[in-house]
Image (spheres, grey):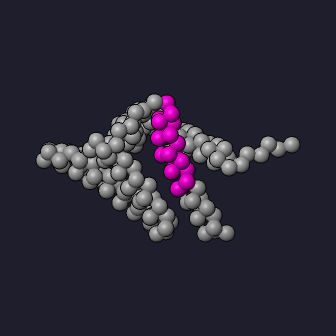
Amino acid sequence: IQPRLDGAGRLALRWGAGAVFCYCLVDSVSALLQLLYRLFGVRPPIFHDHPILSRSIQEFWGERWNLAVHAWLEQHCFRPMARRRRPIAGIVLAFIASTFIHVWITLITLDVWMALLMGSFFIVQGALVLAIAMGLLALSWGPAEITLLLSAVAGGVAFFLGLMVLQATLAFW
């Protein structure tokens, strides 16, 4: 006897499992790289700072996720605008740069459709961060909202990874 799960329950289970998988995958790869570097006596800076503990989308993107890229975007996009008293423009510029980087990588490795999907993900994330920074959107961050945020981010990543695997599989079929 196989239990059958249909509709919203099945979708929620798949998104939740995808979110957990993506988070664990990124965390495992990061830990493995840290271990490999330490075997050779090198102590690299941390790549992620426990993103699951983020209390807001700004904290997720600005303080915890991919700290190396964050530092580069902060130095080259955000700070120059913030020094001119235009921090909102700095946020916009940082997300535009991040969007273009992700679109370019996806475009050269996959195709235009996947690049557009990748770009749309980062445009939505940037719009949310911008709306909160401008006070247009106020979100309280309890456990349910944090779970929703992480599920949305990890679900988006899982969706794009799944499409990339499907694309690669069909290309070699």
* In this picture, residue 93 sits left or right of residue 104: left
Looking at the image, is 102 positioned above or below residue 39?
A: below
Q: Is residue 158 magenta?
A: yes
Query: 61 and 108: which one is in front?
Result: 61
Residue drawn at 49 percent across, 30 percent down: 143
Q: Magenta residues, as a range?
A: 143-161
Q: Position of residue 79 (x, y in %)?
A: 20, 45
Judge by depth and name the residue closer to the eye, 110 or 120: 120
Farthest right residue in view: 1
Magenta stretch: residue 125 in it? no
Q: Is residue 31 visible?
A: no
Q: Is residue 139 left or right of residue 159?
A: left
Residue farthest along the left direction in this orientation: 84
Residue 147: x and y in percent read 51, 36
Residue 83 appears in the figure: yes
| For residue 60, side relative to residue 26 (left or right) | left
Q: Residue at x 47, y 36 (%)?
A: 145
Q: Main structural element of the magenta stretch: helix, strand or loop?
A: helix
Placement of the C terminus among the 4 image quadrants: bottom right
